[in-house]
Structure formats: C-alpha cells, structure tokens
Image (spheres, rainbow, N blue to C red):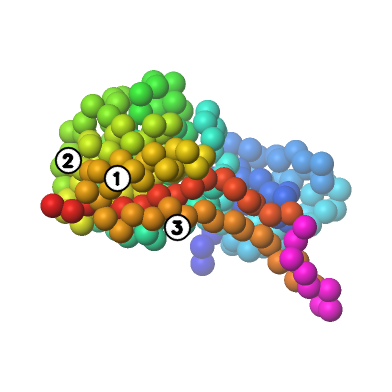
Amino acid sequence: MDVIGENTFILVYRDRRRKWIVRPGETPRLHTHLGILDCKALVGEPFGITAKTSLNDELVILRPTIEDMILKLTRRTQVIYPKDLGMIMVKCGIHSGSMVLESGTGSGATTALLAYLVMPSGHVFSYEVRGDFQENARKNLARLGLLEFVTLRLSDAKEGFQEKDADAGILDIGDPWEALPSFRRSLRPSGVIAAVTPTTNQAERLVEKMKEERFVAVETIEILMRHLEARSGMTRPSNAMVGHTAYLTFGRKTL
C-alpha cells in the first residue's frame, strides 16, 4: 500500500477551493482557518484517509496529481492553464521519449508537465531570456524532482536552438512569430509546433508567419471550461466559468 513519508507531497483536501499541498517533514503542523492539522502524525498512513483538525473539521489526505502540483508552483509569470496544457500535450503527441523544445520557460509550469510526460527517456530543452525567471523555474523543477529531464538554457530562441530533430516545440513568448524560423530549423520533418497567444492580433500575425514558413495543418483554437453543479434534482451549469485564457495555434513542419 502507498503510504505517506516525511518528504512525500500530500494534498490536504476540503473542497475545490480549499486545499493545500505540503510535505510533513517541512510542515509538521498545517495552520488553516479550519483549524490546525497535525501533518507529522500522517507519516506512515495510507493516502485517502480522513484526518481531523484541532477544530474537528475533516480533511481528506490525497496524493497530488501533476495538475495539483503545477498550480501550486511559485510563480514569477502567468502560467498556461491546465485546460490549455492538456490540449497542447495531446496535439503535440508528447509521450515518454519525446524530445521537446520550449521558448519561454517562465515559472516552469509547462516545462514541468512536459518533463513529467517525456520521462524517463525523453528530454525538454527550455530557453529563457531572463535569469530571474529561469532560476525560479529551476527551483520549481527541482522541488518536483523533474530537473534531470530538463536542460535550462539562458538564451533567446529567436537566435536559434542548439538542438536538432526535436519532436515538438512549444512557444510562449510575446512575439512568437519571431522564433518560428528557429523552430523550423530544429524540428524534425512532420514535427509539431504549439504557440500560446493572448490576443487575436497576435494569433493572426503568428498564423501568417507559420504559413510563410511552410507549416501545414495550421489551426487556432480557444478552450472554454465550465463546471457542472451536479446535485440530485438540481443539476445545472455553474454560474462561473474559466473563459478566455489564450488562443492556441498549432502547425506541422514540412520539408
């Protein structure tokens, strides 16, 4: 049975909005508005148990998923939302063994998911122009135990990649069209590129440049997500939703 260790990440779950990720060795006592939870006492216990706080409130102890982890990273930049990340990974065909190029490491959230999917035999090469962003991403990746599957380069992807024949490329910078020639040179034939842009003007300019660079199967999509409030005899869509976060543009390299 999978049990909790001192250095194991645990997800302390009350509901969708009230949840915490800690390690018992680092946070022996978790202070919340629901009371204090004795995390040290959880060591050796199985995941899935219910624990009570000092105020007798019940919290469920779960193993965090990669989605939980990347949403709790220390951020210096805006991260790509999971609803968009999932589509990017599927459209790019990311799998164990993939070699991926990334322009715009940022806080390392996308980098972390890529590393999680390509390990143990694949690798991510992530380029960032700001040293403070890169250092924060390095700490995040190390904390998640994923740094060995990533090479962080303090360099501008617009000036070219050191790597060749990558399976996929991810673009998350303000002017992605400027880096397209670099990706074209370093992607393998038929390789997939995915770019994230917040505005329609950026998406339009990007698509024009992708066609100029002879990428095919070019498409731009937007993903909207809304929860369903499922209750007996009262099920309805939630009043709130995660609306526009980004436009996702994809293309395939040709010879």
Q: Which residue sits furthest left?
A: 255
Using the image as rendered, state which of residue 38 and residue 18 is in the foreground. Answer: 18
Question: Disc 3, disc 1: CB below 8 Å?
Answer: no
Residue 233 highlighted magenta (yes or no): yes
Q: Position of residue 133 (x, y in %)?
A: 44, 26
Disc 3 packing (10 Å; few <14; some 14–19; many ≥20): some
Using the image as rendered, state which of residue 168 and residue 209 is in the foreground. Answer: 209
Residue 49 in view in this figure = yes
Which residue in the structure is indicated by mark 2? 185
Q: Quick check: 224 left or right of 211?
A: right
Using the image as rendered, state which of residue 44 and residue 35 is in the foreground. Answer: 35
Residue 119 in view in this figure = no
Secondary structure category for the residue under label 2: helix
First in sequence, mark 2 or 1: give its number.
2
Question: Disc 2, disc 3: CB below 8 Å?
Answer: no
Camera-side mark, 3 or 1? 1
First in sequence, mark 3 or 1: give its number.
3
Using the image as rendered, state which of residue 109 and residue 37 is in the foreground. Answer: 109
Instruction: Give the residue drawn at x 35%, y 24%.
Output: 129
First in sequence, mark 2 or 3: give its number.
3
Which residue in the structure is indicated by mark 1? 210
Q: Amino acid at mark 1?
A: Met
Q: Which residue sits furthest bottom?
A: 233
Separation of disc 2 and disc 3 at Cα?
Answer: 24 Å
Q: Which residues are magenta?
A: 232-239
